[in-house]
C-alpha cells in the first residue's frame, strides 16, 4: 500500500469515485481512495438510482441538470466498456393535494427558468403516460421526460475504472480509523493497513461522514437515517417513468430487466447507522402501492434492503473546505439525492481542492450556511 499521497479520498461510493475521477482527469497525480468494504458498498449500492431535474430550489435544479447532462454521455466521457444503463424515461410526480399541486406549479416555473423541460400534466395525460395509475386518488401531476434512472453499480464502476486508468489507486477492505493533524494541517490518514501521509483528505464517507469528521475533532451537523426499498419479481415492460409522490410517500420504477423497485421514507426512523429491514416498511409500501398502482401490488416481493440517508439540517449537500483544518474537505449530507448529484459532486469538489472555478458556484452549500442559519430548504423530497 502507498504510504504517501497528494490527495486521500475516504469512501468509494458515487461521490468518492466521481471526485477521484475529476481530480485525476484534471491532472492530479498520486490520488488514493480508501474504502472499508468494497466499491459501491454504501448507500450508493442500496439506492433507487433515480435522477430528476424536478426540484423546487434553483440550486437543486442546476445541480441535477448538470449531472443529468453528464449521465446522458457517461459511457463516452468515462470511456466505459459496459453501459451505465441510463433509462431516460421521465419522472411522473403525482399529487393528492391541491396545496402540493400549487407547489408543483411553482416548481415547474423555477425548473423552466433553469432550462428544464418539465410541465404540468392533466390526470388524463398522466394516465396515458402510466396506464395502470389510479388517478381517482390524485389531484394532478408534473412530468419531465429527461429524468430517469441508472444502474448504480455500473455507474460507480464506470467512474472507478476511469479513475483507475488515470492512475488513481483504490484500496478496499481498508478502514480509516484516525486522522493525524499537526499545527492545524492535515498530515496523515490512519487505516487498518497502516498510515498514508497526505496534505489533503476528502471525507466522502456517506452515512459515516460524521464519524470521519470526529476523527479530526470536527462536529459535522449531519445524522444518518435508514431508508428501505424493495424489488419485485420481473414482469413484461408496463411502466416507463419513475412514479413519485411526496404526499403519498413513494417512488416506483420498473427496472430494465422487468422488476419493480420501490421505496418510501419513514418519519419514525431513529437517527443511527442501522441498515436492517423491517415488516412495517413492507406493510406500508404494500398499502400505498395497492391504492396508487393497483396491478403492481399483485407482484411478489423478491427482496428488501435498506441503506442510509445522510441528512443535513436542510437536506441539501454539504460541499466544504475546512477553515479550522487546512487540507480537510467534506462532501456529504446528500439526503436522498446523492446518487443523482454524483457527477456535479465530483466536479465541484475538484474545483474546491484545485482552487479553480469551472462552473456553477456552490459556495452557498458550505458548512457556513448551517452556522449562520442561511439554510436552503427544498420542498420536493421523499
Ligand atoms: C433506499 C435508498 C434509496 C435512495 N434513492 C436514491 C435515488 O433514487 N436517487 C439519488 O440520487 N439518491 C438516492 N439515495 C441516496 C444516495 O444513495 C446517496 O445520497 C449516495 O449514494 C451517497 O453517495 P456517497 O458516495 O456520498 O456515499 P456512500 O455510497 O455511502 O459511500 C460512502 C463509502 O464510504 C465508506 N466508508 C465509510 N466509513 C469508512 C471508513 N471509516 N473508512 C473507509 N471507508 C469508509 C463506506 O463503506 C461507503 O462505501 C437513496 C438512498 C437510499 C438508502
Image: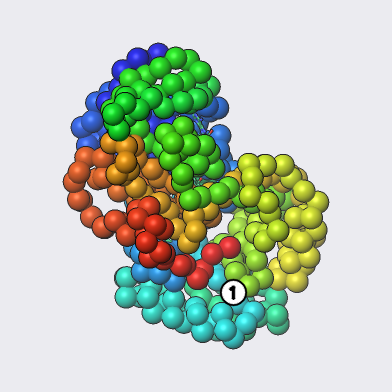
Percent position (x, y) of residue 29?
24, 26
Q: Is residue 13 left or right of residue 230?
A: left
Q: Nearer the viewer, residue 333 or 71?
A: 333
**Colour scheme in use:** rainbow
Q: Residue at x 26, y 58 (%)?
A: 360
Residue 20 placement: quadrant: top left
Considering the image in quadrants, where does the C terminus appear? Answer: bottom right
Residue 309 in view: yes
* Dot 1: element: strand
Q: Position of residue 361 (x, y in %)?
A: 26, 57
Give the answer, above or below, for where 377 lies relative to 17. Answer: below
**Horizontal side of residue 9 vs 120, given as left or right:** left
On the image, numbered disc 1 is attached to which residue? 94
In the depicted structure, whether residue 160 falls above or below residue 225: above
Can residue 11 be seen here? The reply is no
Q: Position of residue 89 (x, y in %)?
A: 50, 61
Query: Residue at position x 47%, y 67% from top?
Result: 378
Q: How many marks?
A: 1
Is residue 34 placed above or below 311 in the rendered structure?
above
Image quadrant in which you'd find residue 164: top left
Q: Identify the residue shown where x is 51% and y is 50%.
A: 222
Q: Is residue 1 above or below residue 324?
A: above
In the image, what residue occupies the spot 70% across and 80% down?
Answer: 137
Circle 1 Cα neighbour tier, 10 Å, few/some/many (<14 / 14–19 / ≥20): many
Q: Quadrant of residue 244?
A: bottom right
Asked if the residue at label 1 sits under 8 Å from ligand 1, the reply is: no
Please state which of residues 312 and 95 is positioned toward the viewer in this rendering. Answer: 312
- For residue 43, side relative to residue 162 (left or right): right
**Residue 214 location (% of width, % of height):** 48, 36
Q: Quadrant of the N terminus?
A: top left
Residue most extreme to the front:
183
Amino acid at each position: 500500500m502507498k504510504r504517501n499521497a497528494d490527495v486521500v479520498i475516504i469512501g468509494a461510493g458515487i461521490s468518492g469515485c466521481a471526485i477521484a475521477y475529476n481530480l485525476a482527469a484534471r491532472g492530479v497525480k498520486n490520488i488514493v481512495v480508501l474504502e472499508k468494504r468494497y466499491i459501491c458498498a454504501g448507500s450508493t449500492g442500496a439506492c433507487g438510482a433515480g435522477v430528476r431535474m424536478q426540484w423546487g430550489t434553483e440550486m437543486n435544479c442546476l445541480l441535477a441538470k448538470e449531472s443529468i447532462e453528464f449521465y446522458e454521455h457517461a459511457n463516452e466521457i468515462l470511456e466505459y466498456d459496459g453501459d451505465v444503463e441510463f433509462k431516460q424515461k421521465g419522472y411522473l410526480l403525482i399529487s393528492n393535494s391541491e396545496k402540493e399541486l400549487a407547489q408543483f406549479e411553482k416548481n415547474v416555473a423555477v425548473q423552466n427558468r433553469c432550462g428544464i423541460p418539465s410541465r404540468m400534466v392533466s390526470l388524463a395525460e398522466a394516465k396515458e403516460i402510466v396506464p395502470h395509475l389510479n388517478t381517482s386518488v390524485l389531484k394532478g401531476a408534473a412530468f419531465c421526460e429527461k429524468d430517469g434512472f441508472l444502474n448504480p453499480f455500473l455507474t460507480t464502476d464506470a467512474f472507478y475504472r476511469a479513475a483507475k486508468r488515470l492512475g488513481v489507486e483504490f484500496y478496499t477492505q481498508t478502514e480509516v480509523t484516525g486522522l493525524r493533524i499537526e499545527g492545524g494541517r492535515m498530515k496523515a490518514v490512519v487505516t487498518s493497513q497502516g498510515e498514508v501521509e497526505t496534505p489533503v483528505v476528502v471525507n466522502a464517507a456517506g452515512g459515516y461522514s460524521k464519524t470521519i469528521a470526529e476523527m479530526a475533532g470536527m462536529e459535522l451537523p449531519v445524522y444518518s437515517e435508514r431508508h428501505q426499498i424493495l424489488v419485485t419479481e420481473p414482469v413484461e415492460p408496463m411502466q416507463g417513468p419513475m412514479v413519485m409522490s411526496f404526499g403519498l410517500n413513494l417512488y416506483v420504477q420498473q427496472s430494465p430487466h422487468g422488476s419493480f423497485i420501490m421505496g418510501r421514507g419513514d418519519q419514525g426512523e431513529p437517527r443511527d447507522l442501522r441498515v436492517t429491514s423491517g415488516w412495517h416498511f413492507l406493510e406500508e409500501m404494500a398499502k400505498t402501492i395497492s391504492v396508487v398502482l393497483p396491478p403492481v401490488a399483485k407482484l411478489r416481493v423478491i427482496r428488501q434492503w435498506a441503506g442510509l440517508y445522510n441528512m443535513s439540517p436542510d437536506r441539501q449537500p454539504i460541499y466544504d473546505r475546512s477553515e479550522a483544518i487546512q487540507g480537510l474537505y467534506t462532501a456529504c449530507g446528500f439526503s436522498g439525492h446523492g446518487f443523482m448529484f454524483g457527477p456535479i459532486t465530483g466536479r465541484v469538489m475538484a474545483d474546491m481542492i484545485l482552487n479553480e472555478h469551472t462552473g456553477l458556484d456552490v459556495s452557498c452549500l458550505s458548512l457556513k450556511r448551517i452556522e449562520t442559519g442561511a439554510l436552503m430548504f427544498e420542498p420536493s423530497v421523499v
